Amino acid sequence: MQDHSVVTLGVADLSGVMDLERMCFRTRWTREQFLLGLERKAFRILGIQERGVLIAYVAFSVIAGEMEILNIATHPFHRRKGLGARLLSEVLRLCRAEDVAEGFLEVRRSNTGAIDLYEKFGFIQIGIRKNYYPDNKEDALLFRLGFQDGQGAGPGTPPSAKEA
Ligand SMILES: CC(C)(COP(=O)(O)OP(=O)(O)OC[C@H]1O[C@@H](n2cnc3c(N)ncnc32)[C@H](O)[C@@H]1OP(=O)(O)O)[C@@H](O)C(=O)NCCC(=O)NCCS
């Protein structure tokens, strides 16, 4: 049984992040974008490793009480094993601990797997950005999660069930 605990990633882990980025996204961030973001503390990256190799990560920012999921990815060989959910769950736990009010994210309209994941955690679609993605002009769906609405407690928890 592998230990899939969530760890905070830093500059030294960026080659693993870039490997996943290449495998998982059509439009990718550059190493410089990740580096600048980490150095300026514009966002944080959490990851899950297996035998020293990064197999999933999430990048998110928290600014003025608002969290944004910037990127989340699981290695194609390791999908549907709960790693994405584990990462998202940890981000939301940190947000609750830091009294974050709400969270946002954008996702391609066609990315039904990711949308399913977000909805399980209580994210609700609040808008559409038409022709948002430059590679194929696909729409982005904008999702929001309100921590004070009792959302974000995790899969299986009714949105109305506020945590103590
Ligand atoms: C989206 C992504 C991060 C999910 O990671 P994952 O580790 O496979 O997710 P999990 O195993 O934790 O899935 C949790 C739940 O999300 C939903 N889900 C995840 N992938 C799904 C898929 N391909 N189809 C349908 N539902 C999916 C399911 O509800 C799943 O629960 P279940 O397996 O019990 O049915 C992964 O598919 C990925 O890296 N995709 C490419 C990058 C990407 O699109 N990122 C999102 C950008 S907005």
Image (tube, rainbow, N blue to C red):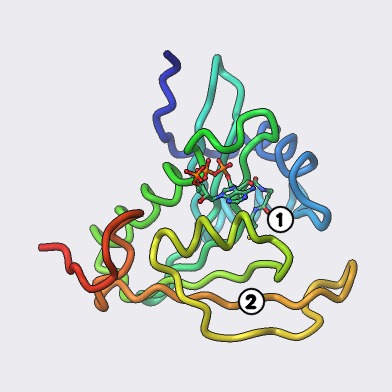
Q: Residues within 10 Å of mark 1 (few under 14, many from 20)?
A: few
Q: Which residue does the numbered mark 2 point to in the structure image?
A: 141
**Residue 24 appears at what percent x and percent y?**
74, 44
- On screen, 128 above or below 18? below
**Residue 78 appears at what percent x and percent y?**
61, 30
Q: Quadrant of the C terminus?
A: bottom left
Q: Quadrant of the N terminus?
A: top left
Q: Are marks 1 and 2 in contact (CB under 8 Å)?
A: no
Quarter occupied by residue 87:
top left
- On screen, 144 above or below 77? below
Q: Which of the two residues, 158 or 95, is positioned nearer the viewer here?
A: 158
Q: Secondary structure at mark 1?
A: helix
What's the amino acid at mark 1? Gln
Query: Which of the two discs, 1 and 2, sits closer to the camera?
Result: 2
Q: Earlier in the sequence, mark 1 or mark 2?
A: 1
> In the image, is 95 to the left or to the right of 17?
left
> In the image, is 135 to the left or to the right of 143?
right
Q: Which of the two residues, 17 or 74, is positioned nearer the viewer here?
A: 74
Q: Residues within 10 Å of mark 2 (few under 14, many from 20)?
A: many
What's the amino acid at mark 2? Leu
Q: Which residue does the numbered mark 1 point to in the structure image?
A: 33
What residue do we see at 29% from left, 71% from top? 147
What residue do we see at 30% from left, 53% from top? 93
